Image: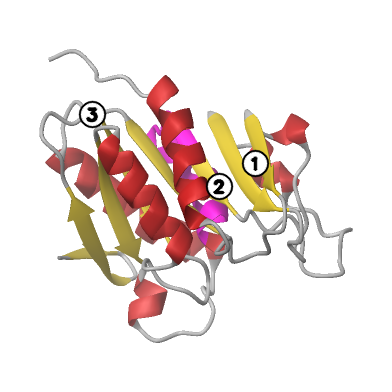
Amino acid sequence: MEFMTPHGPALVEVDRVPDPRFLLVLTHGSAGGVDAPDLLAVRDAVLRTGGVVARVTQPFRLRGARAPGSAVKQDEAWVAVVEELRRDHPGLPLAQGGRSNGARVACRTARAVGAEAVVALAFPLHPPRKPEQSRAPELRAAGTEVLVVNGDRDPFGVPEAADAARLVVLAGEGHDLNKDPARVGEVVADWLGERMRPGPA
């Protein structure tokens, strides 16, 4: 289904479960889509733990843009989508996340939407070969607990453990996290399962 945002429509695919425990909203990186292997593995694992999973294709991707463009506009669009999803799922605790650029969006907007947890897959700590341009402040500014799952061969770097509630570094994985996506899903589902609790009825 399409959700309208201040910067164009976003496409949202929602997978539901009986008696849901929490809502997880996920998004893609700057070049990929919501069918990336790690995102699908996270969806499948989280559904098994009782979470509703919404995967969001952001407006810039629907327009066919090759890059996200303005971070401010991207964040405004994201907040609009998440607020509508929360209205559709009242009372459920919210977690949000994404891979690469989507992980950055999830961190930057966590305070604005009241997320109780953030899942950052392949967080791009810095541009390739430019470690001086660190994006670690986005992790530290999330205002809630952040799980980071990165590969040890990621050319975008690996965050420090001190910058997240939990850092999982997977051996042999690159930025795509596609060698063992089921492991990525398992890590995320276990971590969220320990933290997300339904609110009062």
Spatial distance from mark 2 to mark 3, Cα to Cα?
A: 20 Å
Specify the principal SS of the magenta part: helix
The 10 Å Cα crowd at callout 2, few under 14, some 14 to 19, many 20 or more, is many
Circle nearer the N terminus (2, 1): 2
Spatial distance from mark 3 to mark 1, Cα to Cα?
A: 24 Å
Spatial distance from mark 2 to mark 1, Cα to Cα?
A: 9 Å
Residue at mark 3: 92
Specify start and end residues of the magenta stretch as a single range.
102-118
Question: How far across and down, in percent of the image, does residue 75 sit?
Answer: 46, 56
Residue at mark 1: 139
The 10 Å Cα crowd at callout 3, few under 14, some 14 to 19, many 20 or more, is many
The 10 Å Cα crowd at callout 1, few under 14, some 14 to 19, many 20 or more, is many
Decide if residue 37 is on the left or right side of residue 199.
right
The image shows residue 190, relative to residue 127, as above or below, that is: above
At label 3, the amino acid type is Leu
Question: How far across and down, in percent of the image, does residue 122 sit?
Answer: 62, 56
Element type at mark 3? loop
Residue at mark 2: 120
**Is residue 62 in view from this perspective?**
yes
Circle nearer the N terminus (3, 1): 3
The image shows residue 89, relative to residue 5, as above or below, that is: above
The answer to whether the residue labelled 3 contacts the one labelled 1, judged by CB atoms less than 8 Å apart, is no
